[in-house]
Image (tube, rainbow, N blue to C red):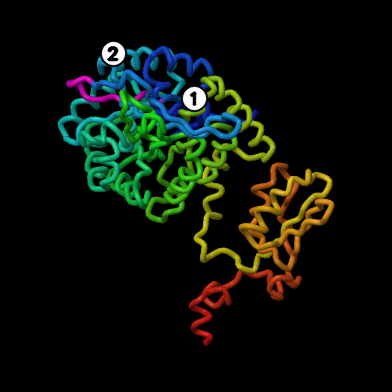
């Protein structure tokens, strides 16, 4: 099997799969079970300062979004940081790290935005033997109202300031966890980089309300007739997370800044996609909460098999897709493809026809005996039919060779990339030609 050993900003672990700071990492019992199941590392649930206790709700803490098969697609949580005493968490972290020295143990921290608060907690965490700290600048509920969490993560100047404090008062590697509740993820990442962060992790949860109880007329989860916005996570947030990871990885200002990818990682393939877009490792939460800690074993075996089949090392996978992430104006406008329907695989459900006829380009013909064929002169290769077809591989996109005539436009398919500034589809080029 491929070697999955990881060295992320000097933090070594037997594989790149870490549990994210969340309910599954709130106590020693859970973390020991996670290590025994095979997780390479754990980010301990966020620690707060000594002082006023954190009090969580004693009622439902999660809202959910399900697919048609009742598969969990997203969780909304209103749980706060750990409500267990700081000294208890620190004692348990020290015990776990002593017994599992080869596993990564990172402490997530969220304290008030004052230099004294950070200066006070860092030596206590360092004394546990933790391998690093993760600064929680992302929690969108409960703590942001207290001037912590995403209230800090949405202000780049605060991110840079706190990161500098942390780098001043500890030798431990520093990971800055970024909130997605912001317009341009590159701004907070650049601030963390300027403050001396060793890495960034993203995404934290997305501000959300998943549903409304239409009898109580209150958001869910509902506590005594009231509901609150919470943090959204799970498979549904993966596309947002992938994009934000890629934006940082391909930014010239942050080229080489290590990234820990978070957001909907459920399978080895999800993890591989994050790594291909620049993540050095991944953190997982919802998948473990849905399927249990042993889900990591499929991730380990799947990623190992993939790397073996590709004959590449884990380090070769990291960032491999970044050069192919482009902006729209740089896409090849001479690339032409058409939809093709495999008649042997087709079950004649008609979804492709209904979708294309009603909402797209009327490019699919239906015969009297429900045989569906593509009309090349109308097909714009949008691939909507591929996505709505219930049979995987039944409809595919076939590229037209250079020199062929596109029946829809009458244009000759060119081999070289088109120049968008003079392309006939560009409104500015049309105006200039007039």
Q: Residue 197, relative to residue 108: is it above or below?
A: below
Q: Quadrant of the N terminus?
A: top right
The percent position of residue 230, horizontal first and vertical second, equals: 35, 34
Q: CA distance from mark 2 to mark 1?
A: 23 Å
Give the tally of numbered discs: 2
> Front-most of 341 and 95?
341
Which quarter of the picture shows residue 81? Answer: top left
The quarter holding residue 51 reads: top left
Instruction: Single out the mark in the foreground, 2 or 1.
Output: 2
Position in image of residue 20 (x %, y %): 42, 29
- Residue at 45% from the left image edge and 25% from the top image edge: 41
Q: Label 2: few (<14), some or many (≥20) within 10 Å?
A: few
Q: Residue 307, percent across and down? A: 63, 36
Q: Quadrant of residue 132?
A: top left
Find numbered disc 2 in the image and state the secondary structure of the residue it sits on.
Answer: helix
In the visual, does 13 lie left or right of 350?
left
Question: Can residue 135 be seen at all in this image of the molecule?
Answer: no
Camera-side residue: 364 or 386?
364
Mark 1, residues whose alpha carbon is within 10 Å: few (<14), some, or many (≥20)?
many
Q: Is residue 48 magenta?
A: yes
Q: Position of residue 319 (x, y in %)?
A: 52, 46
Assess whether mark 1 and mark 2 are in contact (beta carbons under 8 angstroms).
no
Secondary element at image label 1: loop
9 or 402, nearer to the observer: 402
Q: Name which residue lies at 51% across and 36% down.
A: 235
Q: Which residues are magenta?
A: 43-53
**341 within the magenta span:** no
Horizontal relation, residue 256 to residue 50: left or right: right
The residue beneath circle 1 is 40
Mark 2 highlights which residue?
88
């Amino acid at each position: 099997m491929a070697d999955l050993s990881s060295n992320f900003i000097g933090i070594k672990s037997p594989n790149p799969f870490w549990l994210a700071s969340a309910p599954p990492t709130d106590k020693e019992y859970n973390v020991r079970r996670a290590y025994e199941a095979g997780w390479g590392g754990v980010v301990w649930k966020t620690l707060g300062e000594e002082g006023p206790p954190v009090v969580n709700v004693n009622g439902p803490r999660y809202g959910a979004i399900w697919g048609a098969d009742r598969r969990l697609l997203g969780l909304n949580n209103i749980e706060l940081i750990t409500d267990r005493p700081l000294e208890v968490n620190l004692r348990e972290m020290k015990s776990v790290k002593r017994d599992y020295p080869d596993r990564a143990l990172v402490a997530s921290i969220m304290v008030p935005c004052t230099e004294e608060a950070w200066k006070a907690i860092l030596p206590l965490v360092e004394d546990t033997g933790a391998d690093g700290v993760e600064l929680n600048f992302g929690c969108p509920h409960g703590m942001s109202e207290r001037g912590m969490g995403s209230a800090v993560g949405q202000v780049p100047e605060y991110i840079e300031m706190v990161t500098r404090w942390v780098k001043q008062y500890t030798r431990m590697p520093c990971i800055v966890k970024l909130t997605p509740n912001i317009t341009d993820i590159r701004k907070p990442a650049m601030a963390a980089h300027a403050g001396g962060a060793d890495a960034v992790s993203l995404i934290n949860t997305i501000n959300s309300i998943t549903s409304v109880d239409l009898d109580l007329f209150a958001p869910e989860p509902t506590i005594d007739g009231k509901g609150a916005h919470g943090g959204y996570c799970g498979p549904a947030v993966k596309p947002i997370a992938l994009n934000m990871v890629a934006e940082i990885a391909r930014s010239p200002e942050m080229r080489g800044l290590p990234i820990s990818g978070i957001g909907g990682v459920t399978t080895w393939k999800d993890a591989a996609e994050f790594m291909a877009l620049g993540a050095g490792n991944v953190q997982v939460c919802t998948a473990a909460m849905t399927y249990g800690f042993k889900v990591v074993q499929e991730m380990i075996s799947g990623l190992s098999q993939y790397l073996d089949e590709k004959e590449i090392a884990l380090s070769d996978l990291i960032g491999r897709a970044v050069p192919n992430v482009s902006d729209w104006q740089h896409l090849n406008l001479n690339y032409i493809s058409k939809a093709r329907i495999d008649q042997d695989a087709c079950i004649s459900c008609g979804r492709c026809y209904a979708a294309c006829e009603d909402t797209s380009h009327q490019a699919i013909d239906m015969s009297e005996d429900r045989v569906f064929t593509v009309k090349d002169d109308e097909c714009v290769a949008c691939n909507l039919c591929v996505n709505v077809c219930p049979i995987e591989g039944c409809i595919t996109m076939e590229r037209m060779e250079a020199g062929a005539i596109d029946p829809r436009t009458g244009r000759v398919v060119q081999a070289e990339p088109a120049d968008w500034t003079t392309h006939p589809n560009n409104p500015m080029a049309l105006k200039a030609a007039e």
